[in-house]
Image: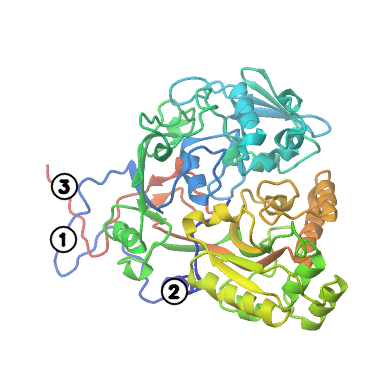
Amino acid sequence: MINHKNLLLFALCALLAACQSPQVQKEPEEVRDTDGIAEMRPENIKLDELTVAFSRHDIELDFRKSYFASEAQIFTAVYEGLFSYHPLTLEPVPALAERWEISEDKTQWTFTIRRNARFWNGDPVRAEDFRAAWISLLAPHRDSPYSSLFDVIEGARDYRNGIERDSDKVGIRAVDTRTLVVKLNSPASFFPAMLCHHSFSPIHPSMVNKTEWSPQRTQGNWMPPVSNGPFRIISMNNESIVMQKCDQYWDRSSVALNKITIKFTGTSDEASYLWNSGEARWISGDVNVDALTDRSGIQVNVMFATHYYFIRSSEKPWSDYRVRRAMALVLPWNEIRGNYFLPAETLIFPVLGYPEVEGITETNIEEAKRLMSEAGYASLEGMPDLVIRLTPSRDAARVGAIMANAWKDLLGFNVRVEVIPFDRYFQTIKDDGYTVGSSTWIGDFADPYAFLQMWRRDSNLNDARYDDADYEDLIERSMIEEGDTRLATLAEAEKLLLNRGTVLPIFFNPALNIVDTGELDGWYPNALDIHPFKYISFRAVRPLPGVAMLPVMR
């Protein structure tokens, strides 16, 4: 998923310094008294209601269209599939799948849906609701960002690409009300982990053909989506989303919160104020750390996420990997990455069992010029402009300038830089008219394939338009392998991406949240920065800094 929260170097360094500063002191759990003044936390505090602050952007409620990290967090409250994420380990936890069976050849999965699985209006969740949702997401006209994740399913790739028009040829069958059978192309040991992703949720029959689910894009008479998660949306506007515990949820006895309010903040100061006032007890997004009166809630952890630049390869001369490789070889990597806390030489953050991959580290101008000559571009006469498309951030300007100067001065390209506003950037990198773009990607499940499937020739997430037969062969080979053998093949595929100059890794992303884990139970730092609302609860009331708790007089 795309992380639209662009953490800059200077902000990260400030945060890390703040976390280690002697000023950061854990406040006492019960009572504080400052200058003899005793006050109470806001009287309307309720231990079954949580307010969260997210940075403002246009929220897409239709999970078939969504690919932002903040939306994925909201979806943990309102949608649920066959499996869900464990809040700490991210391992798949059975959700609507009561049980399942796997065929001897490990390609057919038969799921039995819980008898008490319900949408919030009381209608049962049926196997057909899963099938209809998945088939609708695969529809070629929909161009869903995550449709290529379904390629592990028999016939899914041909159907979403319009090669096969009969949806019955896709390996998804609703045998009866509670039995869903999924046929895979080959064994996929990571399938349950993938099924945690929100794109594999069911859709209520009344919602399948609705084109707009969010109030901002409907002409009045908006109704919240009929969802099946532990919470349901009861109101939504540009300022907030209010969600209420769903009485029909199959595991409602495990849900502690009765109400969740997500406030959308327009500035970092606004987010800090919500924390300082005690109104919001979790800040996920831009926040002014210097303005926090209590810094004990600062949580910084490494994510399974990478910020990278990519070179589009759909048109000449960029379609020649020797040209892309030459572009990578002339970049001063120490200068580009030197300021980051977690500089990235590879695309994939090392995960347990994944082989070490040799990344992009060297600058070799002579080799770059040799490659350009070998590719037939010793002279750049008639060469198209090299267009770098950037976001309007200080860090993007810095990195973009370094890249532009290297490609102009050392290879002779005519370089142009385009700066696109944040609210349009991620759409424009799917359009034509540029050569180099950037993105921050969080793996949607803890497996290297979560990154590598993006670069397949017909993936909807392939913004680089990468098309490499050698790469396709490696990914296909990995699909029939298991364990260390599979991981070794995926590592080969990543090495190919790096060596052929398709992806230029910059840094591994940290997750920044402001949350007091001594106050909130069920919230744990993890590699995907996903925190299922189902498991979150208040441990106990904790006073704000400089505030003493007094008993309520009745």
Q: Give the quarter of the image for residue 451.
A: bottom right
**Rendered residue at 79%/77% (across/down):** 368
Q: Position of residue 434 (x, y in %)?
A: 64, 61
Amino acid at the residue labelled 1: Ala
Instruction: Identify the mark nearer the N-term, 1 or 3.
Output: 1
Q: Residue under circle 2?
A: 14
Helix, strand or loop under label 3: loop
Q: Which mark lies nearer to you, 1 or 2?
A: 2
Q: Which mark lies nearer to you, 3 or 2?
A: 2
Q: Residue under circle 3?
A: 552
Amino acid at the residue labelled 2: Ala
Amino acid at the residue labelled 3: Val
Residue 294 visible at all: yes
Q: Position of residue 6 (x, y in %)?
A: 50, 63
Residue 357 visible at all: no
Most distant residue in the top direction: 176
In front of the other: 82 or 335:
335
Relative to residue 355, is residue 532 drawn left or right? left
